[in-house]
Image (cartoon, rainbow, N blue to C red):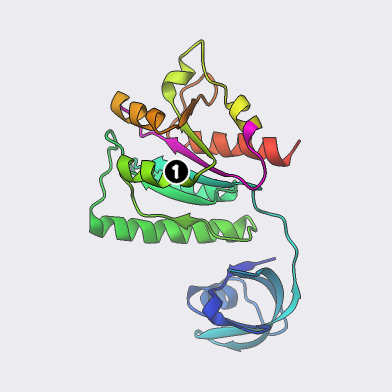
């Protein structure tokens, strides 16, 4: 069933108003009519089964809540994916697929070897684009919330923010090349429901030794994601899939 995330300002009691691009999607793409049902997600109260009671073509659709739904679609831990800026649409791929796999939020990271560089104007446009991708991916994967896209951070800002997390990891490519590596499985066994996890992924050229030293000194624990070297857009998906298996499928 089609799902829409609606701002809290568009709710009044058991009534909900759908505006903006979602109106076009409902009326033109999905061809919905009065009496049809759909799911609306409230930012605080979660998903509700709703019925369309009025369509004002091109402007607004209003609905009535028929039933609040009890869903368990979110990962039992809050996972922050820190992804270094990359070429092309790599960060968009990470946000789209990472949202499907349950990431709680995303932090774009300006690493020393990041090929892409965002100025203030570009960053605003990029964040807006990533927010749209996260919303659409949340609807498609039937999540109960949309991951937040935070502002671009430097390594200093990232380390400062990391103090509030229960578990801090760095996906370090040197671990994949080492015979005496730190096991991801061991770290995942430490994770329990309700905790917060932050994991940092490097750019195409990997972390510099200085960056790695700074993160390790800030109590980030290095892990390998298997014995192969993964692309920057693949590594977060490996991690999230492994975490989901550990916490949700055993």
Q: Determine whether 185 is above or below 89 in the image.
A: above
Decide: few, some or many residues near mark 1? Use Cα within 10 Å; few <14, some 14-19, many ≥20.
few
Image x and y of residue 173, in percent: 43, 23
The answer to whether residue 247 is above or below residue 24 is above
> Which residue does the image show at 59% across and 75% down from the upper left?
26
Q: Is residue 89 visible in this depiction of the protein?
A: no
Kindly identify which residue carries mark 1: 163
158 displayed left or right of 37: left
Residue 231 occupies which quadrant of the picture? top left
The residue positioned 38% from the left and 47% from the top of the image is 108
Task: Specify whether 42 is left or right of 82.
Answer: right
Which residue occupies the foreground of this view, 216 or 229? 216
* Front residue of 175 and 52: 175
Which image quarter is the N terminus in?
A: bottom right
- Closest to the observer, 199 or 173: 199
Screen quadrant of the C terminus: top right
Relative to 36, residue 198 above or below: above
Magenta span includes 198: yes
- The magenta segment is 190-208
Note whether 88 is above or below 52 in the view shown: above
């Amino acid at each position: 069933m089609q799902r829409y995330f609606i701002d809290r300002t568009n709710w009044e009691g058991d009534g909900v108003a759908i505006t903006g691009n979602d109106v076009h999607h409902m009326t033109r793409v999905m061809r919905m009519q009065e009496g049809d049902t759909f799911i609306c997600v409230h930012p605080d109260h979660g998903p509700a089964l709703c019925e369309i009671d009025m369509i004002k073509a091109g402007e607004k659709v209003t609905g009535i809540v028929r039933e609040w739904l009890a869903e368990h679609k979110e990962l039992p831990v809050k996972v922050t994916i820190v992804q270094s800026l990359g070429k092309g649409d790599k960060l968009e791929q990470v946000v789209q697929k990472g949202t499907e796999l349950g990431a709680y939020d995303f932090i774009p990271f300006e690493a020393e070897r990041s090929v892409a560089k965002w100025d203030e104007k570009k960053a605003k446009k990029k964040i807006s684009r990533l927010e749209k991708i996260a919303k659409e991916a949340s609807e498609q994967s039937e999540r109960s919330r949309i991951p937040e896209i935070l502002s671009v951070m430097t390594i200093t800002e990232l380390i400062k923010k990391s103090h509030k997390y229960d578990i801090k990891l760095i996906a370090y490519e040197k671990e994949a090349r080492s015979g005496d590596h730190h096991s991801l499985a061991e770290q995942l066994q430490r994770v329990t429901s309700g905790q917060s996890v932050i994991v940092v992924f490097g750019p195409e050229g990997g972390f510099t030794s200085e960056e790695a030293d700074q993160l390790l000194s800030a109590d980030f624990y290095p892990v390998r994601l298997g014995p192969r070297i993964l692309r920057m857009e693949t590594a977060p998906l490996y991690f999230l899939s492994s975490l989901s298996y550990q916490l949700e499928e055993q």
